[in-house]
């Protein structure tokens, strides 16, 4: 406890933590806490005073009561995969890492629910549901390492969001520890439950600023009986966007409807080597699922609609292995792009589908204006784009251009009726733009809720708003 980081916290505070949790579950040395000083957000880092690993909800409640007694800020963390600085610690803060609370507590096939601790890995939840013949649809790109508590905190999306929605749509209940250490259970297994205010949804997407989620009750679905994956290639961006509109207008809602621009698909092909067409202006990766007959009909209709909008080719995955290969290639987009420059900044904006082609062109113009390398991919079906800036955070002049470019991207997004974040959350990275989107009164309403539940401002302070 002789380090500078640990000295920021009083000895009595650290001693009480160790006495309750055990010295092995409280980190204070600089080399130990260093990995908890940043998340997946580029160019943001700050060391906390200590990192604690509670094992139970009672441990969490104790930590919050102790932090309140010592007026110590608390930043809750799972796997640290967030991309908006939401789990970035403050200097002198306590990081409450829930990674040890990782049990799947119940799979209830009769009620189509699963209950898990907040530190359970999203992929493990999907696998537990799958083993019971059920389906947990939300699939954030980090699902192999992200925790369900982090997904709830950020209201994470994913590739299947177009048809199945986001994390919020599957949270039936949650256990949350409030700033004063009191424990609440919100929600139930009932499909219909309208008793009182919907406080459960208040905590979904709250980014740890209102309470600490310790358990989650999730809705599951029957597993789709069949799937078909298609790859549509286009020589023009507008044609790809028009194909998306045509598919939705035909009342077909694919499971996934993903988009890669030429820069991204070339990087992905170099990385994954799955045979993507390097000369295409854009590709759409489309998956339809459901009853086998419906899947066959939808796949045929999608082929015709894409061809009618100018697709140069539409290819069906011939085998389940090929379908997995194509999906894996899409999921590797960020990793593939990250090979090009030392720093990769994955942004997240959403616009109405009618604005997609125009927004992509605007991003290209912004990249030229600020002399930056920006690739774009994302969830075309729900309008969620990921402009990805390839840069080097050691180049301060270039990073200033990056900041200016992102401000332009946000402005263009809002001008087109969009939102500053579709799935990554506000955190630190997006908070300068939130008031611009919400307006004064809606913004102040958020602050009123924060003050009501965390009057001393100790839970993840400085995130979403100051």
Image: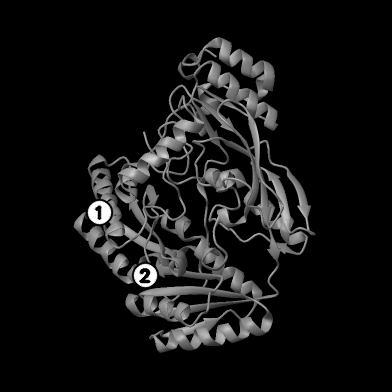
Q: Does residue 311 appear left or right of residue 299 in this picture?
A: left
Residue for point 45% across, 50% down:
424
| Sequence-wise first label, 2 or 1 | 2
Rendered view: 63 above or below 448 = above
Check the image and tell me how it is coloured.
Answer: one colour
Rendered view: 205 above or below 54 = below
Asked whether the viewer can see residue 388, the reply is yes
Question: In the depicted view, which residue is nearer to us: 272 or 32?
Answer: 32
Query: How far across and how far down the image is residue 272, in percent?
Result: 51, 65
The quadrant of the rendering that contains the N terminus is: top right
Rendered view: 380 above or below 418 = below
Residue for point 61% across, 24% down:
63
Q: Quick one: SS at disc 1?
A: helix
The quadrant where residue 236 appears = bottom left
Residue for point 35% across, 75% down:
281
Spatial CA distance of label 2 from label 1 is 22 Å
User: How many numbered discs sit on the rendered protein?
Assistant: 2
Q: Which residue is mark 2?
A: 262
At label 1, counting other C-alpha atoms closer than 10 Å, the crowd grade (few under 14, some 14-19, many 20 or more) is: some
Q: Which residue is mark 1?
A: 408
Query: How far across and how far down the image is residue 311, in percent?
Result: 41, 84
């Amino acid at each position: 406890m002789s380090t500078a980081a640990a000295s920021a916290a009083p000895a009595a505070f650290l001693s009480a933590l160790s006495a309750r949790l055990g010295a092995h579950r409280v980190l204070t040395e600089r080399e130990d806490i260093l990995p908890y000083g940043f998340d997946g957000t580029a160019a943001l880092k700050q060391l906390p005073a200590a990192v604690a690993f509670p094992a139970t909800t009672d441990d969490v409640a104790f930590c919050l009561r102790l932090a309140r007694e010592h007026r110590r800020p608390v930043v809750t963390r799972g796997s640290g995969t967030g991309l908006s600085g939401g789990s970035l610690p403050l200097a002198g803060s306590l990081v409450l890492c829930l990674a040890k609370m990782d049990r799947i507590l119940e799979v209830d096939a009769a009620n189509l629910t699963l209950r898990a601790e907040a530190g359970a890995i999203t992929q493990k939840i999907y696998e537990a549901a799958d083993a019971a013949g059920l389906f947990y649809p939300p699939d954030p790109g980090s699902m192999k390492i992200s925790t369900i508590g982090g997904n709830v905190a950020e209201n994470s999306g994913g590739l299947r969001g177009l048809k199945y929605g986001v994390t919020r749509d599957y949270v039936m209940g949650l256990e949350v520890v409030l700033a004063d250490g009191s424990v609440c259970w919100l929600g139930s297994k009932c499909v219909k439950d309208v008793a009182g205010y919907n406080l459960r949804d208040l905590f979904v997407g709250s980014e740890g600023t209102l309470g600490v989620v310790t358990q989650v009750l999730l809705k599951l679905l029957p597993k789709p009986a069949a799937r078909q994956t298609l790859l549509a290639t286009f020589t023009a961006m507008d044609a790809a966007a028009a194909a998306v509109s045509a598919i939705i207008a035909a009342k077909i809602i694919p499971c996934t409807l993903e988009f890669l621009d030429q820069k991204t698909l070339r990087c992905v092909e170099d990385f994954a080597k799955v045979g993507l067409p390097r000369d295409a202006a854009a590709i759409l990766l489309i998956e339809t699922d459901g009853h086998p007959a419906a899947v066959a009909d939808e796949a045929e209709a999608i082929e015709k609609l894409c061809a009618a909008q100018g697709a140069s080719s539409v290819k069906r995955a011939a085998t389940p292995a090929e379908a997995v290969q194509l999906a894996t290639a899409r999921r590797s987009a960020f990793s593939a792009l990250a090979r090009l420059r030392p720093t990769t900044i994955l942004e997240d904006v959403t616009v109405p589908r009618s604005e997609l082609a125009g927004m992509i062109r605007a991003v290209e113009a912004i990249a030229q204006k600020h002399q930056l390398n920006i690739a774009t991919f994302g969830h075309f079906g729900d309008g969620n784009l990921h402009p990805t800036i390839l840069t080097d955070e050691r180049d301060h002049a270039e990073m200033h251009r990056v900041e200016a470019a992102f401000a332009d991207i946000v402005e263009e997004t809002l001008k087109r009726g969009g939102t500053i974040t579709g799935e990554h959350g506000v955190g630190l990275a997006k908070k300068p733009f939130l008031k611009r989107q919400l307006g004064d009164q809606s913004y102040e309403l958020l602050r009123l809720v924060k003050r009501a539940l965390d009057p001393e401002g100790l839970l993840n302070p400085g995130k979403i708003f100051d």
